[in-house]
Amino acid sequence: MRAIQMKEFGGPEVLELVELPTPQPGPGETLIEVTRAGLNFADTHTRTNSYLRKATLPLVPGGEVAGVRADTGERVVALTGDGGYAEYALAPSERVFPIPGEVDDATALALIIQGTTAWHMYRTAARVQAGESVVVHSAAGGVGSIAVQLGKLFGARPVIAAATSEERRALALELGADVAIDGASQGMTERLIEANEGRELDVVFDVSGGAVFDASYKALAPFGRIVVCGISTSEPNEVRTGSLLRHSRTVAGFYLFHCFERPGMFAQALQDLFALAAAGELRAIVGHTYPLAQAARAQADMRARRTTGKLLLDPSA
């Protein structure tokens, strides 16, 4: 089978198109014929071995696929851990989920990681209540575009989108954001408070870290929460306990894969998202689909923020 393999860590050039044997499922595994593989920002960290979960070489990257079960032909979406950038992939059977007939493969891939992350940021990490203000950074990205829409569906008011280009801000408004502001870190605190009609914020969802996190933290109201679900800048932050105490603020982290340690947490979120998508209430923003051989270009485009929405690989192309 055709696959993308890494034999060393480094830049996009380490992603090589190779021929490998089709993997064979063992006990508790399901073999999937891949129609689309999803790309995630975390894949770029895996490529440099800077992700939370360390990688072992040689490696076929890719943590999520959509396709058909090789044993039954059922349409499924699955979390593979790795091995997804290929024509066939193995997944633990408990992480293989049927795709409803009303949901296409691209939408399923947009929801299985980015969508469930956004869902849990609202329901689990921040416990957003109706009427609370929410800021969504990188609002046109995979997580952000879902988080903007869920904010409206879950009763957040206002939903403030932050993005780095006029085009991305326009998309966020189209998806239901009440206000869209420039996502640059300089002057961020003041812009956030102005967007909330002069009031400090209840909740911020941050995927960047660094200066954006610091500016957003300063905009929080008493009992405000900032949830970290990514550190795309790779810039560290420090929060002093005295600041938390003086302002009654909360800093929370969210890493989706901890949900697998608690049965039902992941499946519930995905089922809710599939139902919303099937009913036409939730729209997955699907970006470019790259041929498998262009995996390096896809990761480079993602890292450079040249893309919008969910990026996919087509193993047949």
Image (cartoon, grey):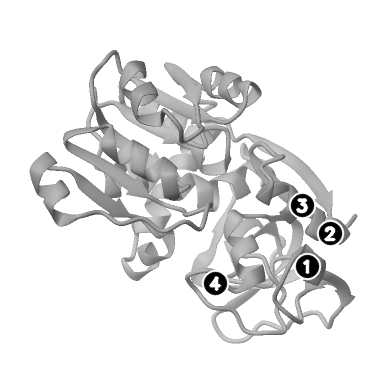
Instruction: Give the alpha-carbon distance from disc 1 to disc 4, as whole Å.
Output: 18 Å
Q: Mark 4 belongs to which amino acid?
A: Ser
Instruction: Give the alpha-carbon distance from disc 2 to disc 4, as whole Å.
Output: 25 Å
Crowding around mark 1 (Cα neighbors within 10 Å: few <14, some 14 to 19, many 20+) is: many
Instruction: Give the alpha-carbon distance from disc 1 to disc 2, as whole Å.
Output: 8 Å
Marker disc for residue 292: 2
Q: Earlier in the sequence, mark 2 or mark 4?
A: 4
Foreground of the two, 192 or 58 = 192
Label 3 near label 4: C-beta < 8 Å?
no
- Please state the horizontal and vertical placement of residue 195, each as a whole percent of the image: 36, 17
Label 2 near label 1: C-beta < 8 Å?
yes
Marker disc for residue 298: 3
- Please state the horizontal and vertical placement of residue 55, each as a whole percent of the image: 59, 79
**Which tag is nearer the camera, tag 3 or tag 2?**
3
Marker disc for residue 93: 4
Q: Mark 2 belongs to which amino acid?
A: Leu
Instruction: Give the alpha-carbon distance from disc 3 to disc 1, as whole Å.
Output: 15 Å
Rendering quarter of residue 71: bottom right
Label 1 sits on residue: 86
